[in-house]
Amino acid sequence: MPTNSEGLLRCYRASLGRETFPYQKRLALEEWPDIIVIPTGLGKTAAVILAWMLKRLRNDTHTPRRLTYVLPWRKRSSSVRKISFSPAPSIGGIP
């Protein structure tokens, strides 16, 4: 399980197939923000899901046990499902 920023960056690179944006790193390493305002297409969905998974694996006490994603469009919800269930590298020994 990544416990430092280098491990986190490796995990993100393997999952997303590219370097992280600064906000993605902050999202995973710092406390949860009240709101995320990022332009379309910059990986918000994957960033939130990965940050949530990593924080849960680190037993972060401020991270809820369940992640609920509420979206207004059916088409968008299928893309969140695809991102959520796509193959990801092993994180913390979990295949």
Image (cartoon, grey):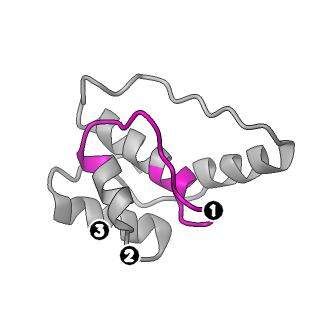
**Nearer the observer, 42 or 6:** 42
**The residue stretch that appears in magenta:** 28-47
**x and y percentages locating residue 3 in the rendered image:** 16, 50
At numbered mark 1, what does the secondary structure look like: helix, strand or loop?
loop
Q: Is residue 46 magenta?
A: yes
Q: Is residue 23 left or right of residue 69?
A: left
Q: Is residue 86 magenta?
A: no
Q: Which mark is residue 19?
A: 2
Question: In the rendered structure, which amino acid carries the disc numbered 2?
Answer: Glu
Q: Tags 3 and 1 in contact by the CB under 8 Å rule?
A: no
Q: Quadrant of residue 23?
A: bottom left
**Nearer the observer, 85 or 13:** 13
Residue density around tag 1, few if under 14, some if 14–19, many if 20 or more, within 10 Å: few
Q: Residue at x 40, y 39 (%)?
A: 52
* Disc with the residue nearer the chain's start (3 vs 1): 3
| Marks 2/3: CA–CA distance | 9 Å
Q: Is label 2 or label 3 in front?
A: 2
* Residue corresponding to mark 1: 40
**x and y percentages locating residue 85 in the rendered image:** 61, 49
* Disc with the residue nearer the chain's start (2 vs 1): 2
Question: In the rendered structure, which amino acid carries the disc numbered 3?
Answer: Arg
Q: Main secondary structure of the magenta part?
A: loop
